[in-house]
Image: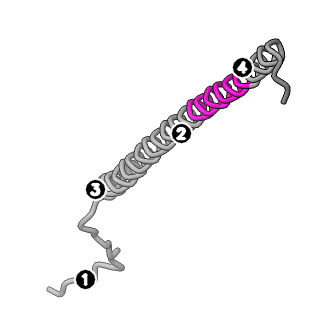
Amino acid sequence: MAKGSKGIQKKTIKSSKTPSKLLKKTSKSTTSKIDKLDASLDLSEITLDLMNHEAAKQKKKSILDHKDLKKDHDKDVATQETQKQNEGDMMKQLEMIGFKA
């Protein structure tokens, strides 16, 4: 007996990766990328915090330096005023005893 034809057969392409495996791979890849982005974002935030801290330290140092310079200037002005006052007092004393410059 002759075998009859089976008709048109559907040819199915079988992938070694089922949709769930593809999804897992994509998910792992995406998770890995997200983890890398999170790590780089954390590093950026830490760097920014360090830069802000350093800027605050520099500003504080600048303010303290300015205060020190102002104190030094005030001392110099006070010293000069005292010297002028002492010179004036000496001139008055010399005039009182009859010395003329």
Under mark 4, the amino acid is Asn
Question: What residue is shown with label 2?
Answer: 58
**CB-based contact (under 8 Å), mark 4 and mark 3:** no
Separation of disc 3 and disc 1 at Cα? 40 Å
Please state which of the two labelled residues, at mark 3 or mark 1, is closer to the viewer: 3
Please state which of the two labelled residues, at mark 4 or mark 3, is closer to the viewer: 4
Separation of disc 2 and disc 4 at Cα? 42 Å
Under mark 2, the amino acid is Gln
Relative height, residue 63 to residue 47 (above, below): above
Secondary element at tag 3? helix
Secondary element at tag 4? helix
Under mark 3, the amino acid is Lys
Q: Which residues are magenta?
A: 63-83
Please state which of the two labelled residues, at mark 2 or mark 4, is closer to the viewer: 4
- Please tell me which residue is depicted at 84% across the width and 30% down the height of the picture: 101
- Please tell me which residue is depicted at 19% across the width and 84% down the height of the picture: 3
**CB-based contact (under 8 Å), mark 2 and mark 1:** no
Q: Which mark is residue 21?
A: 3
Image spot of residue 48 (x, y percent): 50, 43
Q: Quick one: which residue is furthest to the left in this view?
A: 1
Marked residue nearer the N-terminal end (3 or 1)? 1
Question: What residue is shown with label 1?
Answer: 4
Marked residue nearer the N-terminal end (2 or 4)? 2
Marked residue nearer the N-terminal end (4 or 3)? 3
Q: Specify few, some or many for label 2: CA neighbours under 10 Å numbering under 14, 14-19, or 20 or more.
A: few
Relative height, residue 66 to residue 5 (above, below): above
Image spot of residue 41 (x, y percent): 45, 46
Question: What residue is shown with label 4?
Answer: 86
